[in-house]
Amino acid sequence: MNAPQRDITLRFLAEPQDVNFGGKVHGGAVMKWIDLAAYACAAGWSGRYCVTAYAGGIRFVAPIHVGSLVEVEAKVIYTGNSSIHIALEVNACDPKSLNRRLTTHCIVIMVAVDQNGQSERVPQWQPQTEADKKQHESAVKLMEMRKQIGEEMQIFVD
C-alpha cells in the first residue's frame, strides 16, 4: 500500500467566468477552489471519499486578477478519528513574472465517509518537524476556539 499523501497543490489560471462585479476573482470561486483542494488532500491522505465538515478562518488578503496563475496549497495539520484538518493557502501571480503573493488562507475540516455517509477511520498523522508541531498545536487550539464559538452561535439557531 502507498503511504498517505500529506499535501497537494492545485495550479490553474483564473478565468473570465470567475470575475465578480468589481473585476476581480469572486470570493465564492476562491472558496470553491479551496474546497476542491481540501477534498483532494483529504482523499489522498485517507484513501477514502471525504466531505466538508467545516471551513473557517477564511481571510481574503489580496485580490486575484483574471489571467493570474493560481496555486491552492493544502496540507494535513491534524487528524481525529475520522476528521482531517487541513491548512490551505492560495497564492497568485502574473504567469509572466511568477512573483507569487498570498491572497487567501484558511482551515478546512474534512470527514471520511462510507457509501452510506457514515464516518470512517482515517490514518493518524504525527507531526515530525518543529513547524509540524506548531501547526498541530495551533489546530488543537482552533478546535477549542470553534467549540466556544459554536456555543455562542446557538443563539442564532432555532
Image (cartoon, rainbow, N blue to C red):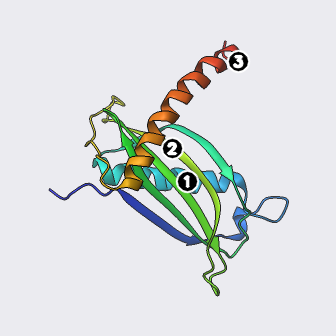
Mark 1 Cα-neighbour bin, 10 Å: few <14, some 14–19, many ≥20 = many
Residue 130 in which image quadrant: bottom left
Residue 19 in which image quadrant: bottom right
Q: Which residue is mark 1?
A: 34
Give the quadrant of the C terminus. top right
Q: CA distance from mark 3 to mark 2?
A: 22 Å
Q: Amino acid at mark 1?
A: Ile
Q: Which residue is mark 2?
A: 108
**Which residue shows up at 25% across the image and 43% down it?**
123
Residue 116: x, y in percent?
33, 30
Kindly indicate whether the residue at mark 1 contacts the one at mark 2 (C-beta within 8 angstroms): yes
The answer to whether 44 appears left or right of 86 in the picture is left
Kindly indicate whether the residue at mark 1 contacts the one at mark 3 (C-beta within 8 angstroms): no
**Which residue shows up at 27% across the image and 42% down it?**
124
**Which residue shows up at 79% across the image and 59% down it?**
20
Q: For this rendering, which residue is in front, 26 or 56?
A: 56
Relative to 111, does residue 42 appear above or below in the rendering? below
Residue 48 in which image quadrant: top left
Residue 60: x, y in percent?
70, 54
Q: Which residue is mark 3?
A: 156
User: Looking at this rendering, what residue extends furthest in the right direction?
Assistant: 22
Q: CA distance from mark 3 to mark 1?
A: 26 Å
